[in-house]
Amino acid sequence: MGRVAVVGQVGRDLVLTVDALPDGGGAADVRGRRELLGGKGANQAVGCRLLGHEAALVAVVGDDPAGAMVLDEARSDGIAVDAVARRGTTALLVDLVEADGTRRLLEHVPGEALLTPDDVRAAGEMLARADAVLLQLQQPGDAVLEVLRIARAAGVRVVADGAPEDDGVRDALLGGAHVLRADAAEAALLLGDEPSGVDATLEAARELQGRGPAVVALAAGTEANVVAWDGGYVVMPLLDAGPAVDPTGGGDAFVAGLSAALLRGEPAEVAAWWGSAAAALTVTHAGGRPDYDTGSVEALAARARATH
């Protein structure tokens, strides 16, 4: 069992399912409602925990009832929250899902809900003890740089998700991350141009891998995922684990599956299929919270490798 520290967004997730959203001035009956622990950081921590690893969060929640609720849920999931700061108002993420799979996401993330370098330094001992740090790059650049500094000093593997907008942070990221995952828009921030199609995405992944990270995973639109490493690559079509209901959390599950397999000592190709399988299982239900186990992810990944 590995020790994972997840640095990223935590908040209250409100998932509403409707047949269809109304036109302006209209109303619609809500068919399903879930209020739960959410945010990219929380989703990745839950995913790693479900796949057999210890998980801890480095994040910020409010000193309000919503903050207490999400922390209680994280604890019940077996996730350590000692490094979660409390101040202000808890972030709120509203996921509106229509019956045809159309998703609209509303986010209220107050400035005080984002990490500061002081928050990161307060979690420094826990970060340095981790076997891997999963770093969400939608956090402020100075906090990201502090995570990279602590991880580099301790020799901890960094799995980075997304792309920072600041040039200096991007350079530090490519020099300090061991694994990098990004979608097409994020790849454009990293490279200056958005790759179009699988071939261009593979070329982009190889270029980024050559600039520092040992493993690079890029989404090729809605067609596939591409993972490149030193001496190899794999192009994976999006897997079918059942009807796709909501894309929310698919990328977070990919990061969790990829990271969990690498921590288990699996080679990059196997880990890539684990990421794809975890994502496929997550999008079959409304909301970004993952709901799988090691057996289901490993089985789907093995079937996919055998048939693609």
Image (cartoon, rainbow, N blue to C red):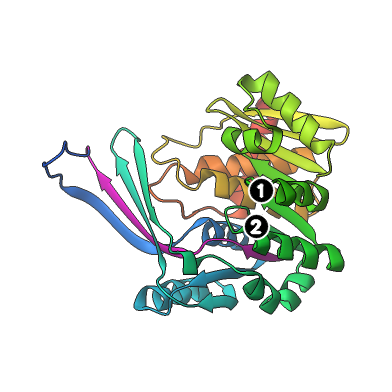
Residue 201 in magenta stretch: no
Q: Secondary structure at mark 1?
A: loop
User: Counting other residues with Cα less than 10 Å from the Cα at mark 1, is it few (<14), some (14-19), or many (20 or more)?
Assistant: few
Circle 2 residue: 141
- Three-letter residue code for mark 1: Asp
**CA–CA distance in space, label 2 to label 1:** 7 Å
Residue 69's place in the image compared with 196, above or below, is below
User: Which numbered tag is attached to residue 166?
Assistant: 1
Residue 134's place in the image compared with 83, above or below, is above
Which residue is more in the foreground, 61 or 78?
61
Residue sitting at x 45%, y 51%: 288
Residue 206's place in the image compared with 275, above or below, is above
How far across and down, in percent of the image, does residue 24 sit? 15, 39
- Three-letter residue code for mark 2: Gly
Residue 3 in magenta stretch: yes
Highlighted range, magenta: 1-20
User: Counting other residues with Cα less than 10 Å from the Cα at mark 2, is it few (<14), some (14-19), or many (20 or more)?
Assistant: many
Mark 2 or mark 1, earlier in chain: 2
Answer left or right for 179 relative to 249.
right
